[in-house]
Image (cartoon, rainbow, N blue to C red):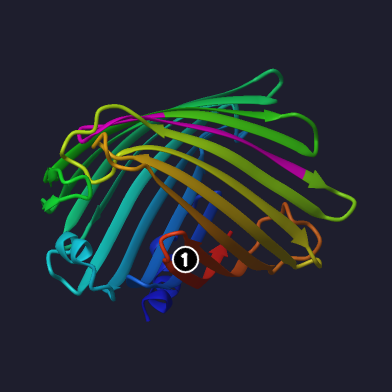
Amino acid sequence: MKLIYLLVILPLLVHSSAYAQVIEATATYTHDSQFKRKEYSSNISQKFYLNEKQSHSLAVNLQSGYSDVERTSNDTSIIQVWDNLDYISQKSGGLNLTLDLFKRYGFSIGQNRGFSQINSDTTQSFGLYAWFLKETIQIAVNQSRTNSKQIAIDTIDRDAFRVITPTSIDGISRNINILALLSTTTIGETSFTEIKRSDRPIAKLYTLGGKQYFTAINGALHSKISLYENLGEIQPLTLQGQTIAQSIDTQWLQRVSDKYIVSVGYRAYFEDESPRAENADDVSRASDTIYGRLTFRNYENVWSHPATEYYAFGTNYKNSDGVRATSWGLGLRIN
């Protein structure tokens, strides 16, 4: 019913004289060995052109989300985090503004907030981007600040250390992203992110990816690798030790007719955790994720033309700790 409400009411809320408009809504169901989750989200974007040549524009993006989560695990650590609750409701919303000048330069600002019975998060973000070398290289820098409120946990972790998690956590994230149009069919992208949190040492994330389009078969390959490092002194404020993680993500997209696209992807994740106690053993974890999507566009032949899209998607996840999860959902995007 919530998805039906979103699909009916959103077009009425966004009626305006904007030149470009996108409405999107999704519904997702996820089930694993610890939780059952029903999630609904909506996204409204409108672009207002500020001059007759349409070289300047202001994009307004509104986001909202709602999810019902049921705890199915009797793990004592999860019960403590959930404050002995069996069921929580999570709500989120956000507003982002992006100003584009001459179709080459721009900046964005935004604020997002999420909350439930056991936690809340507030994030403010700011970003700049510019195109160089005849609009073949884009450099973007972004910064965000987050404050999280949560229930304090007082427990003895597996290192035999007493850990008391804080009720308030402040964080700041800085990112630089470089995108290169290497040819008419090849895109390269790399980024670096630094994350500072009041309860953790500084974390660093490096990514490298690319997209290769194969026009002869109407297909594309998207791939990305990443390295995450969270090293340094671990205070008795968190249950996670020093961490190094790597991931590989690859996806194939195939146009199978004038109106359908099928995509299938695989993600492998590897993590090594070093506990704070010197005599404790390191812990290695791994996970596999397979995901896919089927998209139908109500417009023939020209895929660059704005058109209404209907899509179905699914994910299957498993990790070395024995957790298994499946999710599936439906979505609608109106251009």
What residue is at 62 percent from the left and 56 percent from the top?
Answer: 266
Q: Main secondary structure of the magenta part?
A: strand
Residue 75 pos. (x, y %): 23, 68
What residue is at 22 percent from the left and 50 percent from the top?
Answer: 158
View extreme (bottom): residue: 1
What residue is at 29 percent from the left and 72 percent from the top?
Answer: 68
Give the left or right position of residue 190, taking residue 127 as reference.
right
Kind of residue indicated by mark 1 = Ala
View extreme (right): residue: 216
Quarter of the image that includes the N terminus? bottom left
Give the left or right position of residue 287, taking residue 249 as reference.
left
Residue 28 pos. (x, y %): 45, 71
164 or 170, nearer to the observer? 164
View extreme (front): residue: 279
Q: Quarter of the image holding residue 111?
A: top left
130 or 280, nearer to the observer? 280
Q: Residues within 10 Å of mark 1 (few under 14, many from 20)?
A: many
Q: Is residue 1 inside the magenta stretch?
A: no
Quarter of the image that includes the C terminus? bottom right
Residue 121 pos. (x, y %): 23, 48
Q: Which residues are magenta?
A: 194-212
Marks counted in the figure total 1
Residue 124 pos. (x, y %): 29, 37
259 or 141, nearer to the observer? 141
Give the left or right position of residue 43, taking residue 281 as reference.
right
Residue 146 position (above or below residue 46):
above
Residue 33 position (above or below residue 98):
below
What residue is at 42 percent from the left and 42 percent from the top?
Answer: 272
Q: Which residue is mark 1?
A: 25
Q: Is residue 201 inside the magenta stretch?
A: yes
